[in-house]
Amino acid sequence: MSTTDKDTLHLLSIFHYIMAGIIALLFCLPLLHFAMGVTLTVGGLTQEEPALGILGAAISVVVGVIILIGWGLALLVFLAGKNLDRQTKYQVCLYGAGVLCIFIPMGTILGVFTLVTLQDDSVKELFNRNSASPVLSEETTPSEEL
């Protein structure tokens, strides 16, 4: 509830933005493999080498899915940073911090520090005041929320 909590959440949001950019850039690297798969698919659709077309299509699909998952994770981390700064959508912030723990070592450090900060009662109170849906605390159970 103090200004230090707001300052901490603002600083965490900046670091979330930075990590989201790094994650998005990291998952741009497989675009080279995706282009290779598309090239094999287009070039391998001749009668001479039909297996190359199938291999290229498989590579394109697998790498495309990996790229989309990575960009989705980057988007989740970005949204978590945005919501940390606004002190809204507590669950999105928790999920974003959990996703960050995958990216060793910097993401893990940021994710754990964010999780620890979000467990503080004064931070939960900030989210309760700014959010439409209340944050679940230890005293309330999901049946009491309904």
Image (spheres, grey):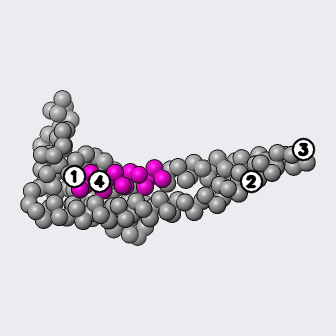
Q: Are marks 1 and 2 in contact (CB under 8 Å)?
A: no
The magenta-colored residue range is 71-85
Q: Is residue 75 left or right of residue 33?
A: left
Q: SS at mark 2?
A: helix
Per the model, the C-alpha gap separating discs 2 and 4 is 38 Å
> What's the amino acid at mark 1?
Arg
Residue identified by numbered label 3: 47
Q: Alpha-carbon distance for marks 1 and 2?
A: 45 Å
Q: Amino acid at mark 2?
A: Thr
Report whether residue 127 is seen: yes
Pointer 4 residue? 82
Whichever of labels 4 and 3 marks the residue nearer the N terminus, that label is 3
Pick whichever of labels 1 and 2 is earlier in the sequence.
2
What kind of residue is marked 4? Lys
Which of these two is toward me, 105 or 16?
Answer: 16
Residue located at (76% from left, 53% from top): 40
Q: Residue at x 45, y 50 (%)?
A: 72
Q: Is there any visible trace of residue 55 in the rendered image?
A: no
